[in-house]
Amino acid sequence: MSFYNVDYMPDHELWPLLGFSPASDLTTGVPVQIWNTEHLIFNFPISYGADNLTPIYDYGDEGDVLNVYDNATALAGVTLTLESNESIIVLRNNKQTLYNGFLIDEFNQDLDDPTYLDSYELWLNEIAFMLSPTINSPEDITIEYGTIGAHVT
């Protein structure tokens, strides 16, 4: 889910369910810093090689910085390192919702140079992550990403 104006309805009952509340407005031109570069939404199917997403458009309201609750995890924000009330991409801990607190089409450039726009890379990776299958039984099997020849039945 992407939305840029949660502070318009700060007490909406959906925000806590998604794992956040609005903290402040996103300042125009501030890069979104990737706090967890190893997370799949920055690596699969396209490896995003930059450490931030930098907006190039000004729509008047760029989005909202978020305060993350215990039922969610912050993956990116507006500071160089993870800080409270500075989040911008939030994943619910049950991996059922992923929220972007900005206008994703602001990232209409190619910082990491794989020939794809940054907005497309992020959008594609987020969709791939959200649609990836989940295996919950048996719980004691670990298959490392990239392993060839493993069979799950």
Image (cartoon, rainbow, N blue to C red):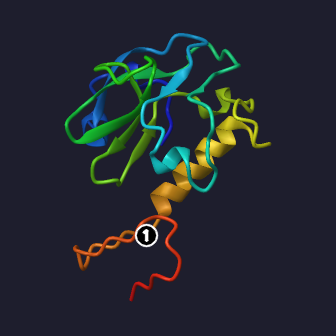
Indicate the position of residue 136 as horizontal and vertical percent values: 27, 73
Residue that mark 1 sits on: 133
Identify whether 14 is placed above or below 133: above
Identify whether 38 is placed above or below 95: above
Left or right of 101, for residue 91 = left
Q: Which image quadrant is residue 64 in?
A: top left
Q: Which image quadrant is residue 72 in?
A: top left
Left or right of 81, for residue 111 = right
Say few, some or many: other residues with alpha carbon within 10 Å of mark 1 (under 14 / 14 to 19 / 20 or more): few
SS class, disc 1: loop
Indicate the position of residue 62 as horizontal and vertical percent values: 56, 19
- Residues 148 and 61: in front is 148
Q: Which image quadrant is residue 57 in?
A: top right
Residue found 50% across the figure and 37% down from its top:
2
Residue found 19% across the figure and 37% down from its top:
70
Indicate the position of residue 44 as horizontal and vertical percent values: 57, 54
Q: Residue furthest right?
A: 115
Left or right of 120, for residue 130 = left
Q: Amino acid at mark 1?
A: Pro
Indicate the position of residue 60 as horizontal and vertical percent values: 61, 12
